Image (spheres, coloured by chain):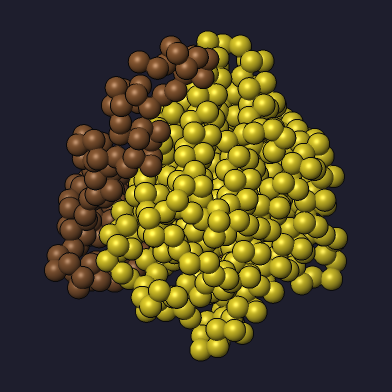
C-alpha cells in the first residue's frame, strides 16, 4: 500500500504564511488578537496535515476502487479531530476574553505582580523579621545582651 | 484481561455525563464521582499486576495496530495510571467537603465534578495510549478540563492567572500538533511502536527536528526551566484541590511523555547533554524561587517545578538505573507534592490566608496539621527513610555510575537543591506553625473528610516507603523493558509492520482476542 506523498508546494506555502501570521498575532498583548492568532496558526498546522497526506485530488474513501486511486484517509481523520478541538478551545478562549473585558474594561494579558512585590520589598529591606533570624538589633545591642557563662562575677562586675 | 484496559478512560467519562445530567443534585454528583474513581482505581491496581507478565494491547474499534488506535499498557503506564487515579480520588474526597464555592464567589459547583472526572479520563488516556495522535487528544481532554477548573468562578485573579495558563497551554498543543504533522509526513504513521521502528531509519537532521519539537511541546507541559515561568504564576490562584491535582498530575503527564520520547521514539540519548543542563538549571532556579516566596502556595509551586528537574535528570542519564530512579521519583513526587498542596489548603482554610508573614501559631491551634505538613515536607526534602530520599539516592547512584563531569555537576546541583528545599520547608513550617502570629486563628474543627483525605495521602507516601523494595524492583523491570524496547514493539506489532488483517470484527464469533 503506497500513497503518492509528493507534497504540493501551494499547500506548503499556505501553511507557512498562516503559521507566520498566527505567530505574529500570538505575540500581541490583546487577548482578542491572541485568539485570532491561535485560530490562524491552527489552520496553518491543519493544512500541514494535508501536506502530509500527499497529493490532492483523489477521494479518501473509495469503495471497490484500487488503492492507487485513493488519498491517505488517516491525515484527514486527524485534521477533523484537530479542527473540532480548535473549535472548542476557541469558544472557551472567547468566553475568557469577554469575562476579562467585563472585569477589567480591557482584554489585555496582565503581568504577575507578586514577584515584583517581593523584589521591591527586598530592595527596601522590608522583608518580615519573622522570615529571617534577624531580630533587627545591631551588633552592639546584641553584645550588651550577651552573658558570658564562663566568666566569674568579679570579671563581669565593672 | 484486555477488556479492563480502556476502563480507566471510559468509567470517568460516563460518570461525567451522568454527573452533568444530575447537575442540580450535588450530593448525588459527589457519590457518582467517588464511585467512578474508586472503580477506576480498582481497575488500575489489577492492571499493575496483570502487565507485569506482558504488556496489554487493545486495538480500539477493531482496526489492527498500525492503522487503528492501539491502547498499550506496560509497567510504566500501569504504575502512572494507578498512582494518578489514587491521588485524584484523594483530592476528590478532599474537595467534597470544601464545596469549592465556600468563599461565596459564586462558583458553579455543578460543573466541578463532571470537569474533574473528564480531567481524570484525559490523564488516564494520555498514560495508556500507544498512539501519538491519541496522546495529543488525551492532552487536549485534560487541558480543556483544566482550563475550566483553573478559571472556576471567573474571579478577577483567576481570569488573570488563567489567561496565561491557557495561552501557554494552547501554544504547546500547537507545537505538538505541528510535530505530529511532520512525524506523519516523514514516516506515514503515528503508532508509537511503528514509529519506534521507522524514526531511527530517518535522516539524522530530520530526526533531530522532530525530536526537539516533541521535547519542547512536552517540556512546556512538564514545566522544565526555560519553559516553566507560567507555572508559579497560574497555579496558586486556583482553589486548593484544583492546584493540588494539577501539581500532582499535569506536569507528570509531560514528564511521562518525555520518557516515552527519549526511550521509545528516539533512543540513543542524542540530546542527553542538553537534558542534563536543563535538569540542572530547572532544579536550581526553581528552588531559589521557592526560597524567596512569602505565599505558601507559590512557594510550593516553585518547589514543584524545581523537582521536575530531578525526573529529567534521571531520564537524561540514559541508563536503566537512571530511568528506574526517574520513574520512582515521579511516583514519590506525585504523592508528596499533592499532599503538601492539600495541607496548604487546610492551612488557608484555618488561617484565612496563605501569606507566611501573617500566618502563625498553627501548631497550637491544629497540631495534626503541623505533623502532616512536617512529614510531607521532610519527604519532599529527602530525609531518610522516606521515598524522597530513596529516589534521590537512586539518581545519585545513576549519576556516579555515569561518571562524567556534567553528571557530577548534577550531583552537586541536586544536593544543593535538596538542602534548599529543606530550608524553604523548615522556614515555612516555622513561620506557619511554630512562631506566634499577631492574630492567632481561633481553634475550630476542620471538615473531617478534608483532614482525612490529606492525612490519607501523607499515609500513602509513608506506605510507599514501606513497600519501596518491591516498588523499586518493579520500576527496575519497567526501566529495563523500556530501554530494550522489543517487548513494547512486539506486543503491539506481533507480525511485524504489516498485519495479516486490517480489521478484526470485535463482534465476530471467531474473535480469538481472549
Q: Quadrant of residue B440?
A: bottom left
Quarter of the image that includes the C terminus of chain A: top left
Residue B313: where, in percent of width, then height? 55, 28
* Residue at 72% across, 35% down: B385
User: Does the rendering let one see residue B27?
Assistant: yes
Closer to the camera in the image, B220 or A66: B220
Give the quadrant of residue B206: top left
Q: Nearer the viewer, residue B351 or B141?
A: B351
- Chain rendered yellow: B
Q: How many marks?
A: 0
Please name whichever residue, B426 or A20, is drawn nearer the observer in this view of the structure.
B426
Considering only vertical position in the picture, is B124 above or below B319? below
A109 relative position to B244: left or right? left
- Measuring from the top left, give residue B198's x and y in whole percent: 58, 35
Which residue is situated farthest in the bottom direction here? B24
Chain A: drawing colour? brown
Residue A81 position (above or below residue B16) = above
Residue at 38% in and 35% down: A132
Q: Is residue B438 above or below residue B103?
A: above
Percent coordinates x, y for residue B413 in the rendering: 50, 22
| Residue found at the far left of this picture | A105
Amino acid at each position: 500500500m503506497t500513497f503518492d506523498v509528493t507534497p504540493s508546494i501551494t499547500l506548503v506555502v499556505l501553511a507557512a504564511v498562516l503559521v507566520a501570521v498566527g505567530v505574529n498575532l500570538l505575540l500581541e498583548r490583546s487577548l482578542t488578537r491572541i485568539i485570532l492568532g491561535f485560530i490562524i496558526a491552527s489552520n496553518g498546522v491543519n493544512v500541514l496535515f494535508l501536506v502530509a497526506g500527499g497529493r490532492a485530488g483523489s477521494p479518501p474513501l473509495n469503495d471497490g476502487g484500487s488503492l492507487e486511486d485513493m488519498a491517505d484517509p488517516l491525515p484527514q481523520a486527524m485534521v477533523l479531530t484537530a479542527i473540532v478541538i480548535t473549535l472548542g478551545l476557541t469558544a472557551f478562549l472567547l468566553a475568557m476574553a469577554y469575562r476579562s473585558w467585563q472585569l477589567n474594561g480591557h482584554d489585555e494579558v496582565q503581568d504577575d505582580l507578586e514577584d515584583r512585590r517581593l523584589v521591591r520589598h527586598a530592595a527596601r529591606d522590608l522583608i518580615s523579621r519573622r522570615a529571617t533570624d534577624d531580630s533587627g538589633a545591631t551588633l552592639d545591642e546584641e553584645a550588651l545582651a550577651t552573658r558570658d557563662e564562663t566568666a566569674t562575677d568579679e570579671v563581669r562586675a565593672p | 484481561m484486555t477488556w479492563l484496559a480502556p476502563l480507566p478512560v471510559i468509567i470517568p467519562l460516563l460518570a461525567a455525563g451522568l454527573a452533568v445530567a444530575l447537575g442540580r443534585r450535588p450530593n448525588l454528583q459527589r457519590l457518582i464521582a467517588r464511585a467512578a474513581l474508586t472503580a477506576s482505581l480498582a481497575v488500575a491496581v489489577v492492571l499493575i499486576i496483570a502487565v507485569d507478565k506482558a504488556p496489554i494491547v487493545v486495538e480500539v474499534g477493531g482496526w489492527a495496530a498500525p492503522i487503528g488506535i492501539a491502547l498499550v499498557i506496560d509497567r510504566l503506564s500501569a504504575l502512572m495510571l494507578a498512582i494518578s487515579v489514587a491521588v485524584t480520588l484523594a483530592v476528590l474526597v478532599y474537595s467534597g467537603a470544601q464545596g469549592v464555592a465556600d468563599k461565596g464567589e459564586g462558583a458553579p459547583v455543578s460543573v466541578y465534578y463532571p470537569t474533574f472526572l473528564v480531567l481524570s479520563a484525559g490523564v488516564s488516556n494520555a498514560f495508556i495510549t500507544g498512539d501519538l495522535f491519541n496522546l495529543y487528544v488525551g492532552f487536549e481532554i485534560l487541558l480543556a478540563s483544566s482550563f475550566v477548573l483553573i478559571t472556576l468562578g471567573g474571579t478577577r485573579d483567576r481570569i488573570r492567572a488563567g489567561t496565561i495558563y491557557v495561552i501557554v497551554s494552547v501554544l504547546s498543543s500547537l507545537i505538538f500538533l505541528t510535530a505530529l504533522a511532520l512525524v506523519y509526513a516523514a514516516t506515514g504513521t503515528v503508532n508509537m511502536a511503528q514509529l519506534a521502528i521507522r524514526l531511527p531509519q530517518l535522516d539524522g537532521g530530520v530526526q533531530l527536528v522532530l525530536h526537539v519539537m516533541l521535547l519542547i511541546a512536552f517540556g512546556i507541559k512538564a514545566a522544565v526551566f526555560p519553559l516553566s515561568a507560567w507555572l508559579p504564576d497560574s497555579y496558586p490562584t486556583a482553589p486548593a484541590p484544583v492546584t493540588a491535582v494539577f501539581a500532582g498530575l499535569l506536569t507528570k503527564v509531560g514528564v511521562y511523555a518525555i520518557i516515552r520520547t527519549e526511550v521509545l521514539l528516539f533512543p540513543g540519548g542524542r540530546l542527553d547533554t542538553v537534558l542534563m543542563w536543563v535538569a540542572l538549571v530547572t532544579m536550581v532556579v526553581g528552588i531559589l524561587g521557592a526560597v524567596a516566596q512569602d505565599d505558601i502556595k507559590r512557594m510550593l509551586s516553585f518547589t514543584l517545578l524545581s523537582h521536575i528537574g530531578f525526573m529529567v535528570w534521571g531520564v537524561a542519564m540514559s541508563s536503566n538505573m537512571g530511568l528506574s530512579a526517574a520513574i520512582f521519583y515521579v511516583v514519590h513526587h506525585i504523592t508528596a507534592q499533592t499532599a503538601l498542596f492539600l495541607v496548604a489548603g487546610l492551612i488557608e482554610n484555618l488561617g484565612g490566608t496563605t501569606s507566611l508573614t501573617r500566618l502563625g501559631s498553627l501548631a497550637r491551634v491544629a497540631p495534626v496539621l503541623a505533623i502532616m505538613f512536617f512529614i510531607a515536607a521532610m519527604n519532599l526534602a529527602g530525609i531518610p527513610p522516606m521515598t524522597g530520599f530513596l529516589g534521590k539516592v537512586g539518581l545519585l547512584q545513576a549519576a556516579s555510575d555515569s561518571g562524567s563531569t556534567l553528571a557530577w555537576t548534577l550531583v552537586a546541583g541536586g544536593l544543593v537543591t535538596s538542602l534548599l528545599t529543606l530550608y524553604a520547608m523548615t522556614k515555612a513550617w516555622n513561620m506557619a506553625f511554630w512562631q506566634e502570629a499577631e492574630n492567632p486563628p481561633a481553634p475550630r474543627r476542620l471538615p473531617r473528610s478534608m483532614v482525612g483525605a490529606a492525612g490519607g495521602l501523607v499515609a500513602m507516601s509513608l506506605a510507599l516507603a514501606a513497600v519501596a523494595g518491591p516498588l523499586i524492583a518493579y520500576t527496575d523491570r519497567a526501566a529495563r523493558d523500556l530501554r530494550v524496547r522489543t517487548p513494547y514493539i512486539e506486543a503491539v506489532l506481533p507480525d511485524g509492520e504489516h498485519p495479516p488483517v486490517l480489521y478484526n470484527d470485535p463482534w465476530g464469533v471467531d474473535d480469538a482476542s481472549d
